[in-house]
Amino acid sequence: MDNGESSTNNSSRPWESYNTVFTNAKAGMEGVDKEKVQRIVYELSKGSKYFQNEERKETLMKQKIEHMHDRSAKLSSSDLSNYQKVVDRRILELEATRDLSRIWLHVDMDAFYAAVETLSNPSLGGKPMAVGGLSMISTANYEARKFGVRAAMPGFIARKLCPDLIFVPVDFTKYTHYSELARKVFRNYDPQFIAGSLDEAYLDITEVCRERGLSGGEIAEELRSSVYSETGLTCSAGVAANRLLAKVCSDINKPNGQFILQNDRSTVMTFISSLPIRKIGGIGKVTEHILKDALGIKTCEDMVQKGSLLYALFSQSSADFFLSVGLGLGETDTPQARSRKSISCERTFSATEDEKLLYSKLAEIAEMLSDDMKKEGLIARTLTLKLKTATFEIRSRAVSLKRYTCSSEDILKHATKLLKAELPVSVRLIGLRMSQFSDEIRHSDPSQETITKFIVQKDFSRQNLDDNKIDASKNCLSNDESMSLSFDTHETSYDQLKDVLENEEQSQLDANKVPPNQECTRKEERPQVLEGDALLIKHKEYKPDTSHSMNDNSSAQNSEPVTLFLPIEPLFWIDGYKCNLCGIELPPSFVEERQEHSDFHLAQRLQNEESGSSSSTTPTSKRRILGKEKANSKPKKQKQSEKDDATCHLVLYYPHTISFQERTPEEMKMALNLIPPKLNLSPSNSLGEPKSLPSMSDILTSSRARNLDLKIQTLGPFFRVTGKNADTGGEIGRAEGVVRPWFGQGLVLHLDTIRLTKETMKMDKSVLGVGLYVGAVAIRHGYDCGCRTAQLLAIYDSDLYHSKLVRFYRRIGFEEVKEVSGSLIGDMADMLVWGGVGTRMDANIHHLLLKWSKVFLKSNV
DNA sequence: GCGGATCAC
DNA sequence: TATGGTGATCCGC
Ligand SMILES: Nc1ccn([C@H]2C[C@H](O)[C@@H](COP(=O)(O)OP(=O)(O)OP(=O)(O)O)O2)c(=O)n1
Ligand SMILES: [Mg+2]
């Protein structure tokens, strides 16, 4: 592997072991003498603090690789064959999700900043030029790239590579302007295009192609030509069946070119097979190294070939991502816009130990950060201090405050404490970040402006350090008014449910948590990307990463449903902790989880039998299970020993860990995604959801006006929504359920319980109103997880209550599917799954949200 | 919840 | 002389 390379080269050609990102392939670097570049970079870096730190990191990476390698060597052949089974099944399941019906286009401007600069100063044309300074350059034009000059390279090194290099300082306003021009063009092809950074976007051109009878390639030509005529800038495009592939494609014929990958499985597979893994977004320098040096994986094809190793050594979510990459899969839907989760500000300066100086830098940064937060109307409660020491070591120190804040005084006060604890230290960078925002999300969530606009904002700037209390009372004096306003809207649009909802006096409008946001200027159509190359609110939520240690990752892994085809066998815990059916590990102390788990296996089996295939049911053993209401009694160790050899479609879940994981609803959406790779940016334009479905934040915002404090938690695919009285904290209602595949329906949202505790409610009349809110969060969660259908059981308690329930659910959009009476064998699966008898009802989630949109989206005044 | 790493642009 | 800034995710504690 790397033996020969490192030992011989280190002595004679030391630069070969200094691996920088600059050695990676990149458009415009084809004819570059890589060795020469590497040598020069090495010569100028050698011995520097930066270099030493890179060496330190390199060492750590090597250790990681070695560790991974050892682990792979220890795997027995039986381990591998077991993992291979998992891989084979997973491949089938992933393959089933392949969607070749959509046409995605990824467009990326060529040498963006540099091209813009050339536009405003044509004399730069044809000459090697870089945007940035001698310390760092942001990008370089293609003339400069011939010399090996590229983004993120220090300017002084670039100048050594290319003595005639012209430097132009950055000017974000210009780039933003041209970015906007280009986006106007994009909008013509996909009004909901997903904007990445200033210079790239994803467009779903399926409809345009269909409507105009043009191919993806023709649309790409036209779009690029249009971008050129509108901006004077060239760009490159990639067209493929999903975003991951489209992104890879846009780089192929860059600059000023395009590449179309036909939506045909074998074409895709051929394309992907020889593709170096580093080309895939999310696989960077480290991951590439680990996969290559420890596992011998170089191409995407290898990912499939060595799938068993991946599943043995990485977390399930990472392995899933890798495998899906190997299959050429990627996201094909248009994700919902996501709001930012943190805001930060950091500055580099010449390293110093001078405490006075450091404190004053800190104060400046706190001030800038505070200003930014105010501009966005954000308040947050977790503060993180970031330091880069003179030796380039990165340190971070965080505190969570009792109250939300955006004041520079608050920030500085706590930041100072954090910094103080680190002194003395020589520092070259200080940064501050605020996260854990107060509920609202508004920003980037277009539909949100509805309520926001009702809130008359005063300038909440400068809450004098009153320390605490920033809250609503101070900022939004007109709170009551705004709330009642929104409430009215709410009620009127509810007429359909009036009889059930009854009154809604909703006396105490709390507004307690309403943040002081304003974000006035939300221009009607603004992708949320803003200034500078910074604000790209992009995330790749799939971070394949090297999980290490942990012989068996399978235990605490992510929650991802895995479908297995296994013969039915009795369930028991191998060695007392490992499920013999699926291998999941659950220590005996995980009583509840074990219960759910064994129930789940049994239920799946029953459903399978019911749903056709094998009719050989074995009623006996299941009967008793059914007695216990869902959560309590225990199905002993399933003795359904009568294992028919029927092959069963089992779905099992890997619980994330012992406890529910607290997540904000926004985060939630991605928690259960099946297909990992996503680099999901913010949908641009303000229209947000196509049909203006109520977003999670709409629902939450609306609920707060009703003094409801809603929360959602997840445990793997399971979720729990709780509604509390915002004043007392007392629980008013909750909904629980699970997101899971259902026969022939893809993912469905299974609503287990919607429980309301009217005792604790002040206004016991609006119980069902609360139920609607709690349910809406669950439904929206389902929507975000990709469910199309929601299922529930209107439980039979008493005639009166039951019919009321059915009526209620029917009104809000559910339809009766069947009666589960308990008298038919076929009911057993339902009874087991649902924990009782009643009326099974289904609803189309999209329709449901549409129907409810009037409620949660106060139509514009 | 915190801290370190990784990644993208 | 000189190696950026912003935001996100994941993992292991
Ligand atoms: N580490 C980086 C990478 C990029 N950028 C900025 C400058 C680029 O102009 C812009 C777009 O990034 P790209 O990766 O798309 O690079 P270019 O557009 O400059 O070149 P090309 O897309 O032709 O390869 O983002 C940056 O500031 N820092
Ligand atoms: Mg570009």
Image (cartoon, coloured by chain):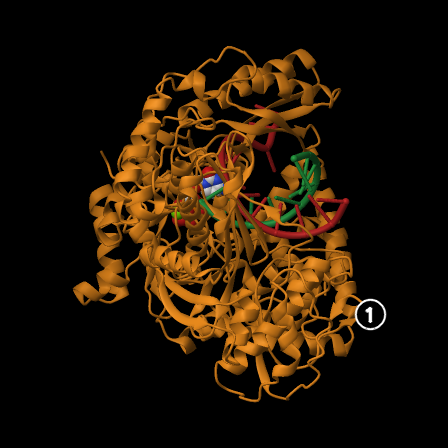
Chain colours: A orange, B green, C red
Name the residue: 64% across, 25% down: A428
Q: Is residue A825 above or below residue A416?
A: below
Distance from mark 1 CB to nearest ligand 1 atom below 8 Å: no
Q: Residue, x 79% and y 64% (percent of image)?
A: A70
Residue found at the far left of this picture: A212
Q: Residue at x 53, y 69 (%)?
A: A326
- Asked which quadrant contains residue A266, the reply is bottom left
Q: Is residue A465 above or below residue A758?
A: above
Q: Relative to A551, is A610 on the left or the right?
A: left
Query: For the N terminus of chain A, which image quadrant?
Result: bottom right
- Most extreme residue toward the front is A799
* Residue A270 image point, x, y percent: 46, 75
Considering only vertical position in the picture, is A432 above or below A611?
above
**Residue designated by label 1:** A575
Question: Quadrant of residue A831 in the image?
Answer: bottom right
Q: In x, y percent, where is residue A132?
A: 46, 32
Q: Position of residue A810 (x, y in %)?
A: 34, 59
- Whether residue A48 is visible to the viewer of this picture, yes or no, is no
Outermost right residue: A575
Amino acid under disc 1: Asp
- Label 1: element kind: loop
* Residue A764 in view here: yes
Crowdedness near tag 1: few (<14), some (14–19) or many (≥20) residues, C-alpha within 10 Å? few
Q: Would you place residue A796 above or below residue A638 in this image?
A: above
**How far across and down, in percent of the image, does residue A698 sit?**
37, 41
User: Depth check: A762 or A299 in front?
Assistant: A762
- Chain on which label 1 sits: A
Rendered image quadrant of residue A567: bottom right
Q: Quadrant of the C terminus of chain A?
A: top left
Q: Nearer the viewer, residue A822 or A813?
A: A822
Q: Residue at x 51, y 29 (%)?
A: A727
* A87 left or right, relative to A505: right
